[in-house]
Image: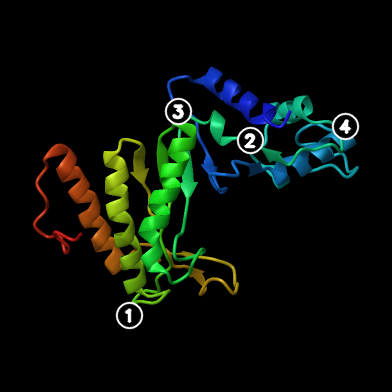
């Protein structure tokens, strides 16, 4: 029963448009292959208990429309088919049903903080394991590190621009190798620009993983990334590199 939920969603989605690959980002490891859908579970439990429909506002303890925006009637119907009241299976096998495996990974940041030396090994091993297990292409949908604009320390430490630069550079050769092996589809840095966050102990006023500041001024990593993407384009299409690249021939 635990596999029915994602398989049903996949079949429904493919029936809407079979020309596009289907995927979502997994936060789990390759040997776990589970997804926790706690919000959906709690939502559907309440719906089933109260015998209500989407957007019910009868004042009898139901969930209002704006509390769970984005969950449609067919989602509830799927849950009614796959679970019984108070017998919810929280973990669902999921990656096996996707066309592309998407992963967010912050090596040397959330895991093994400060260990830039481990990035290459860990990235290559995990992405290769995903492909070997499921025989599907892999897309890195997030990677990176936080960097406070203007902060520099040598040797590089976390939260400095130097650390973000080295984090990206440690990924590039591995991405090139795995792309050459034919299963890595792409690399997506998080994030384009810094943005404001609530006050919390894990961020200095804002999320500072951006290549640009909140004011849209480039950090050094923005120039490195510009070189990276232009180099990829040049290798794939033969297009000439711009003369104003700040990094040329960076390994």
- Neighbour class for label 2 at 10 Å: few (<14), some, many (≥20)? some
Cα distance in 3D space between marks 3 and 2: 18 Å
Rendered view: 171 above or below 100? below
* SS type, badge 4: loop
Marked residue nearer the N-terminal end (2 or 1):
2
Rendered view: 128 above or below 158? above
Residue 87 in the image: x percent, y percent?
Answer: 84, 36
Residue at x 35%, y 43% (from the top left corner): 186
Marks counted in the figure total 4
Cα distance in 3D space between marks 2 and 1: 43 Å
Would residue 69 appear left or right of 114 to someone viewing this image? right
Residue denoted by label 4: 51
Residue at x 44%, y 60% (from the top left corner): 107
Cα distance in 3D space between marks 3 and 1: 43 Å
* SS type, badge 3: loop
Name the image quarter holding residue 249. bottom left
Marked residue nearer the N-terminal end (1 or 4):
4
- Neighbour class for label 4 at 10 Å: few (<14), some, many (≥20)? few
- Looking at the picture, tell me which residue is in the foreground, 248 or 96: 96
Cα distance in 3D space between marks 4 and 2: 28 Å
What is the number of the mark on residue 229? none
- Looking at the picture, tell me which residue is in the foreground, 13 or 114: 114
Residue 81 in the image: x percent, y percent?
Answer: 76, 24
Cα distance in 3D space between marks 3 and 4: 35 Å
What is the number of the mark on residue 93? 2
Q: Are marks 4 and 2 in contact (CB under 8 Å)?
A: no
Name the image quarter holding residue 211. bottom left
Q: Quadrant of the N terminus?
A: top right
Q: Are marks 1 and 4 in contact (CB under 8 Å)?
A: no
Residue denoted by label 1: 155
Residue 12, visible in the rendered structure: yes
What is the number of the mark on residue 21? 3
């Amino acid at each position: 029963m635990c596999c029915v939920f994602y398989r049903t969603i996949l079949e429904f989605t493919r029936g809407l448009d079979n020309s596009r690959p289907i995927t979502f980002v997994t936060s789990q490891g390759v040997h776990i292959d589970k997804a926790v859908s706690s919000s959906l579970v709690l939502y559907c439990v309440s719906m089933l208990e109260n015998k209500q429909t989407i957007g019910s506002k009868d004042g009898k303890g139901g969930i209002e429309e704006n509390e769970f925006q984005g969950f449609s009637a067919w989602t509830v119907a799927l849950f009614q088919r796959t679970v019984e009241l108070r017998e919810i299976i929280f973990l669902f096998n999921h990656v096996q049903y996707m066309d592309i495996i998407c992963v967010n990974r912050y090596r040397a940041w959330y895991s093994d903080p400060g260990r830039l030396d481990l990035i290459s090994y860990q990235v290559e091993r995990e992405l290769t394991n995903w492909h070997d297990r499921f025989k599907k292409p892999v897309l890195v949908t997030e990677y990176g590190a936080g960097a406070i604009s203007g902060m520099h320390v040598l040797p590089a430490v976390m939260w400095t621009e130097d650390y973000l630069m080295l984090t990206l550079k440690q990924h590039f050769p591995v991405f090139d190798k795995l792309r050459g092996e034919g299963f890595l589809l792409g690399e997506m840095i998080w994030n384009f620009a810094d943005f404001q966050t609530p006050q919390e102990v894990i961020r200095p006023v804002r999320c500072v993983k951006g290549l640009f500041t909140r004011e849209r001024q480039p950090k050094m990593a923005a120039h490195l990334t510009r070189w990276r993407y232009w180099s990829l384009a040049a290798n794939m299409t033969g297009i000439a590199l711009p003369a104003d690249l700040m990094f040329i021939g960076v390994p």
